[in-house]
Amino acid sequence: MDTIQLIPMIRREMLRKHQNISGVARKLNLNQSSVNGMLRRSSMHVQRLIEFSDVLQYNFFREIAAMLPYAEPADEMQIKDQEHIKELEMEVRILRQMLKDTTSR
């Protein structure tokens, strides 16, 4: 899998939202050199990305998830529905067998 280029995504959203480094730093309660340093690294802590998402009002996590080649996780309701369907299918098989046994007598 290719490396996800997070920093260019953040810079793109800063441009799109007309936010400069000093403005973002102010909103993050950091000094400008700290934000500059973060935007020079190749990675970022998840909590910091949450903070950038909040400041820029953009869900970087959704964009990153869309790049991953993996299936979506099943939610609780889907799992319960699948289990319920299996139970109903078993009941149908049992009832059919009972009906078949009853009519063959």
Image: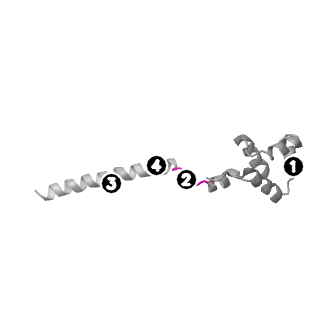
10 Å crowding of disc 1: few (<14), some (14-19), many (20+): some
State left or right for residue 60 relative to residue 86.
Answer: right
Within the magenta stretch, is there residue 73? yes
Residue, disc 4: 79
Badge count: 4
At 70% across and 52% down in the image, what residue appears? 60
Identity of the amino acid at label 1? Ile
Mark 3 / mark 1, whichever is N-terminal: 1
Percent across and percent down for residue 39 are 80, 47
Residue 63 image point, x, y percent: 67, 55
Of the numbered discs 4 and 3, the one sitting upstream in the chain is 4
| Disc 4 to disc 3: CB gap under 8 Å | no
Q: Secondary structure at mark 1?
A: helix
Q: Quadrant of residue 97?
A: bottom left
Q: Is residue 13 magenta?
A: no
Q: Main secondary structure of the magenta part?
A: loop
Q: Would you name the residue on which mark 3 appears?
A: 89
Q: Nearer the viewer, residue 14 or 83?
A: 14
Which comes sooner in the sequence, label 3 or label 2?
2
Instruction: Tell me the CA gap for discs 4 and 3.
Output: 15 Å
Query: Looking at the image, can residue 27 be seen?
Result: no
Region rendered in magenta: 68-74
Mark 3 neighbour density, 10 Å: few (under 14) some (14–19) many (20 or more): few
Q: Determine if residue 53 is in view.
A: yes
Which residue in the structure is indicated by mark 1? 21
Report the mark closest to the observer, 2 or 4.
2
Q: In terms of secondary structure, where does tag 2 sit?
A: loop
4 or 1: mark nearer the eye: 1
- For disc 2, the marked residue is 72
Near mark 4 (Cα within 10 A), the count class, few <14, some 14-19 or many ≥20, is few
